[in-house]
Amino acid sequence: MRKKIMTLLVAAMVIGAVGCGVKEEPVDEILESDNSTEISEEVETVTSSTDSSSLSGTWQSISMTGEDKAYPAEYYVQFTDSEINYGSMTDDGKFEVDHSDKIDSMEEVSTGIYRVKAESAKGIQYIYQTSEEDPSVMEYYGTWSEDEFADTYSGGASLTKCD
């Protein structure tokens, strides 16, 4: 069972990279730049932060692949300090908000693992939490109670990082 889940997550990450567009940087620029100090400072900033900058950028719902084609993400998500914005991407690649859910709390539960507790307008409480295996995946749990995580996990409602 775990092997199937891992296979689906890997497939979703590949689709996510393709669906969001892979950012390409010329190899000569990567090789010529020596910014190891800058990179280590950025890592320290991200891992010590519990605000929305830890979850910045656009995330997408995990989409499945069919024979010979990938299906687009069902929806896209952006985190702010107080809201989770759900929406779609326009043809020119801009994020357009459809609706927002209120963030109750945002915390780093262990190094690099972030948990966002949110509540929908209909009162549904849920959590997005960074996957322990892959920081570009936010796992969805339909509860605020950690004791109920196993029963409320939803891979289809989980997110992968776009950018």
Image (cartoon, helix red, strand yellow):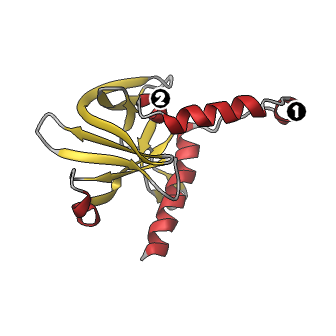
What is the distance, in whole Å, between disc 1 and disc 2 at their CAs? 29 Å
- What residue is pinned by disc 1? 28
The disc at residue 132 is: none
Q: Residue at x 60, y 35 (%)?
A: 44
Residue sitting farthest toward the left? 122
Position of the N terminus, as image quadrant, is bottom left
Residue 69 spot, x, y in % from top left: 52, 53
Q: Nearer the viewer, residue 52 or 2?
A: 52
Q: Nearer the viewer, residue 98 or 3?
A: 3
Q: Nearer the viewer, residue 119 or 154?
A: 119
Residue 160 spot, x, y in % from top left: 47, 46
Q: Residue at x 27, y 42 (%)?
A: 117
- In the figure, 94 relative to 142: above or below? above
- In the figure, 7 relative to 102: above or below? below
State left or right for residue 35 relative to residue 112. Answer: right
Residue at disc 2, secondary structure: helix
Residue at disc 1, secondary structure: helix
Going by the numbered disc 1, the residue's amino acid type is: Asp
Residue 33 spot, x, y in % from top left: 84, 29
The residue mark sitting in front, 1 or 2, is 2
The disc at residue 53 is: 2
Q: Is residue 163 visible?
A: no
On the image, which quarter does residue 88 sit in?
Answer: top left
Q: Residue at x 56, y 31 (%)?
A: 45
Q: Is residue 22 visible?
A: yes
Going by the numbered disc 2, the residue's amino acid type is: Ser
Q: Nearer the viewer, residue 56 or 6?
A: 56
Q: Earlier in the sequence, mark 1 or mark 2?
A: 1
On the image, which quarter does residue 59 sit in?
Answer: top left
Residue sitting farthest toward the bottom? 1
Position of the C terminus, as image quadrant, is top right
Say whether marks 1 and 2 touch (CB < 8 Å): no
